[in-house]
Amino acid sequence: MNKFILIIGLMVSFCAASSQQSIHIPTDSKASYTVLEKGNLGGLRTIVTKRDGSSGTSYSQRAYDCSNGQVKYLGTGDSLAEMKASKPDPNLSPIIEQSIAYYVGKEACK
């Protein structure tokens, strides 16, 4: 029975890890980005990303108005808990082409 529970646990862990997806950000080529979660908030698309780079690891949650090309941060921090506790931007802003938000938005708005 214990072996069965262990195998099920490993399968769940593998499925959760395999659902994470890397995205390429050409304007931040020395860092790696992983999509942890995608969703919706009202009429906005949301995405949580993890950035691993020379300065360390950080997490961001952004909300995109895909139709109007706008974005805002819902949270950012050095851990998921810090990201969730941070204050969201009050307003959406235009997405600047070739920016990190631009490339993350391409994934969020798929």
Image (cartoon, helix red, strand yellow):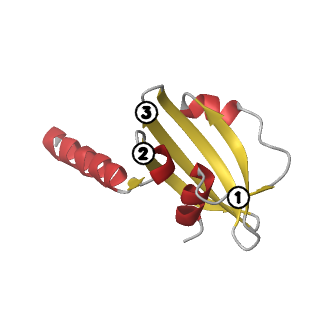
Q: Which residue is mark 3?
A: 53
Earlier in the chain: of badge 2 and badge 3, it is: 2
Instruction: Give residue 29's mark.
Output: 2
Answer with mark 1 or mark 3, whichever residue precedes in sequence.
3
Q: Nearer the viewer, residue 53 or 19?
A: 53
Residue 38 location, quadrant? bottom right
Q: Nearer the viewer, residue 33 or 94?
A: 94
Mark 2 → mark 3, Cα distance in angstroms = 9 Å
Tell me the kind of residue under disc 3.
Gly
Query: Horizontally, is 64 left or right of 92 in the view?
Result: left
Quadrant where the C terminus sits is bottom right
| Element on which disc 3 rests | strand
Q: Are marks 2 and 3 in contact (CB under 8 Å)?
A: no
At a point 66% along the width and 50% down the height, the residue shown is: 62
Q: CA distance from mark 1 to mark 2?
A: 19 Å
Could you tell me which secondary element the residue under label 1 belongs to? loop
Residue 106 drawn at (x, y percent): 56, 65
Q: State the residue at coordinates (63%, 46%).
A: 61
| Residue sitting at the far right | 90
Residue 18 sits in quarter: bottom left
For the residue marked with disc 2, what is the amino acid? Answer: Ser
Q: Amino acid at mark 1?
A: Ile
What residue sits right under mark 1 in the picture?
95
Q: Position of residue 6 (x, y in %)?
A: 20, 41
Q: Earlier in the sequence, mark 1 or mark 2?
A: 2
User: Circle 2 — which element?
Assistant: loop
Cα–Cα span, label 1 and label 3? 23 Å
Residue depicted at x 60% and y 52%: 99
- Tell me where residue 33 appears, x and y as whole percent: 44, 46
Q: Where 76 falls versus 104 (above or below)?
A: above
Of residues 67 and 31, which is closer to you in this image? 31
41, 56: nearer the viewer: 56
